[in-house]
Image: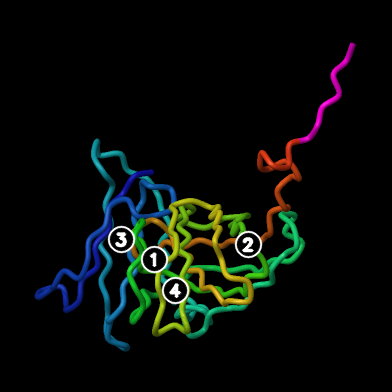
């Protein structure tokens, strides 16, 4: 239940190592290699072995094509997200980072920057000074997530507003009617790992009437 794997090009007499892996599969013990830049029509040799203690066993091996990148792989394809009037998230959009690639031409985030190799983008128009952005139903081979919020006139002129490694981003000081961009990515830098999720922009309720001293509620004094 614990193995290593390597892939080679060439032939059995003149092999060249392409990549070697130990524990990148979802279970953390077996191997998984995600590789680009291979030559179509060429033969790739796969070497597999058990890890330590000469413990033999059986295994399955599978070679697949990854799906194409999601439509919102880059900022220019950011998916407009509905803004909910409350925090119940009655309106959401689903997303994935599978096959997503690193974005270019936008400022690097200030948190979990090594994981930005699989970012996807969303946009929303603020209708309140405060909003809560959440990711729920997170599944996949990597479930640690990061959210980064940007403002600007467009994808070529963005400025990071806030960033957090986690599934909930609470933001305030927003300008009503302005479009904001949200960058979503996994925290891991390991290629090939991905997450599926549900994306929501919610609106917190207004503050209570006695939020400030000037609105202090008069309390009746009991006898």
Q: Quadrant of the C terminus?
A: top right
Residue sitting at 39 percent across and 85 percent down? 156
Question: Alpha carbon of mark 2 to alpha carbon of mark 3: how far?
Answer: 23 Å
Q: Quadrant of residue 208?
A: top right
For disc 4, the marked residue is: 99
Q: How far separated are the C-alphas under marks 4 and 2?
A: 17 Å
Task: Work out whether mark 1 precedes mark 3 in sequence or the reverse, and give the earlier one.
Answer: 3
Residue labelled with disc 2: 198
Question: What secondary structure is marked by label 3?
Answer: helix
Span shown in magenta? 217-223
Disc 2 to disc 3: CB gap under 8 Å? no
Give the mark, 1 or 2, whose residue is nearer the N terminus. Answer: 1
Task: State if disc 2 and disc 1 touch (CB < 8 Å).
Answer: no
> Which secondary structure, mark 4?
loop
Q: Quadrant of the N terminus?
A: top left
**Residue 207 rendering spot, x and y as whole percentages:** 70, 48
Lower position in the chain sequence, tag 2 or tag 3: 3
Magenta span: helix, strand or loop, mainly? loop
For label 1, the crowd category at 10 Å Cα-Cα, with few meaning under 14, some 14 to 19 and many 20 or more, is many
Task: Tell me how far mark 1 sits from mark 3, CA to CA.
Answer: 14 Å
* Dot 4 and dot 2 residues touching (CB under 8 Å): no
Image: 21 above or below 99: above
Q: Earlier in the sequence, mark 4 or mark 1?
A: 4
Give the residue pinned by disc 3. 114
The image shows residue 167, relative to residue 82, as above or below, that is above
> Taking 38 as reference, is 209 left or right?
right
- Pointer 1 residue: 192
- Does the magenta segment cover residue 221? yes
Left of 193 or right of it: where is 12? left
Q: Position of residue 125 (x, y in %)?
A: 62, 75
């Amino acid at each position: 239940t614990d193995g290593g794997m390597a892939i080679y090009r060439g032939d059995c007499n003149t092999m060249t190592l392409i990549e070697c892996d130990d524990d990148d599969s979802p279970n953390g013990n077996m191997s998984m290699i995600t590789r680009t830049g291979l030559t179509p029509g060429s033969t790739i040799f796969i070497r597999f072995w058990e890890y330590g203690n000469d413990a033999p066993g059986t295994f399955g091996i599978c070679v697949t094509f990854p799906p194409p990148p999601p439509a919102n792989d880059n900022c220019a394809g950011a998916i407009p997200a509905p803004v909910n009037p409350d925090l119940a998230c009655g309106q959401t959009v689903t997303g994935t980072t599978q096959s997503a690639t690193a974005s270019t031409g936008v400022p690097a985030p200030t948190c979990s920057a090594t994981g930005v190799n699989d970012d996807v983008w969303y946009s929303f128009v603020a209708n309140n000074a405060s909003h809560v952005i959440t990711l729920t139903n997170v599944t996949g081979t990597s479930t640690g997530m990061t959210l980064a919020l940007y403002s600007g006139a467009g994808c070529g002129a963005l400025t990071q507003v806030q960033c957090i490694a986690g599934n909930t981003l609470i933001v305030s000081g927003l300008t009503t009617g302005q479009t904001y961009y949200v960058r979503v990515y996994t925290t891991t830098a390991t290629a090939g790992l991905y997450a599926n999720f549900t994306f929501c922009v919610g609106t917190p309720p207004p503050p209570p009437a006695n939020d400030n001293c000037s609105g202090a509620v008069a309390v009746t004094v009991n006898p």
